[in-house]
Image (cartoon, rainbow, N blue to C red):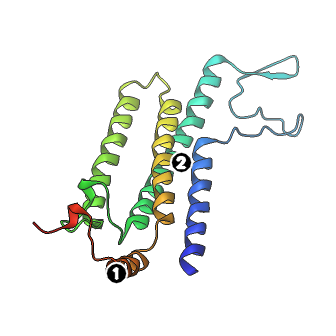
Amino acid sequence: MTRNLTNSALIRTMILLLLAASAPSMGVLGAAGASTAPPVGYSSRVAGEYRTTEADRARRSKKKWKKAWIVSWIAFAAVNILDAHSSAGHIEANPLLRRADGTFSARKAILVKAQLGGGLFGAQLWMVKSHPDQNYYKSFTFATTGVAAGLGAIAVRNYNLPSPVSATASAATASAASPVLPEYLRRK
């Protein structure tokens, strides 16, 4: 029962992180006449109204999407940790992340996930820094959030698998009832 409560809390946290990464805050301007200073990003005042220039809009959009990109990387890191936690003790399907006996290897997972995540982050950062006039943050935010959502779906699936202890107990009970093993498990 405790594992189920923990799993649901982790899943809720993961969903909130993904939602925060995919829906960046738009910012709220104050009420008209509340301040004598122009709102941030507005450059000129014409006939009592504030007007923005195209450069101001582009700068604000880039700043907004840069924040969303950073949040998407935080969500990506959190989901990777959640995925590793959900795989602990289970049989691993990915040959890069399993031991010789077929169970999940946390050491290999940390190395592989750090290398792949670091490579993805490095490529995105290189593109952003090599083309400062372009706003790649929006597309990179969606890409990183998409990868995080995929990993989150895998983590949710892993949490819904039976625990290794109950799987071992049921396998022992099944083998005692019927001694016939599948062909791939028979000794040759």
Quarter of the view holding residue 105: bottom left
For the point 45% across and 62% down, the residue is 158
Q: Is residue 137 above or below residue 7?
A: above
Quarter of the view holding residue 188: bottom left
Q: Nearer the viewer, mark 2 or mark 1?
A: 1
Q: Residues within 10 Å of mark 2 (few under 14, many from 20)?
A: many
What is the three-letter code of the residue carrying label 1? Ala
Which residue lies under the disc numbered 2? 71
Secondary structure category for the residue under label 1? helix
In this image, 139 relative to 5: left or right?
Answer: left
Residue 172 image label: 1
Q: Residues within 10 Å of mark 1 (few under 14, many from 20)?
A: few
In this image, 31 relative to 16: left or right?
Answer: right
Give how far across and how far down residue 154 sits, in percent: 45, 54
In this image, 60 relative to 136: left or right?
Answer: right
Q: Which of pointers 2 and 1 lies earlier in the amino acid sequence?
A: 2
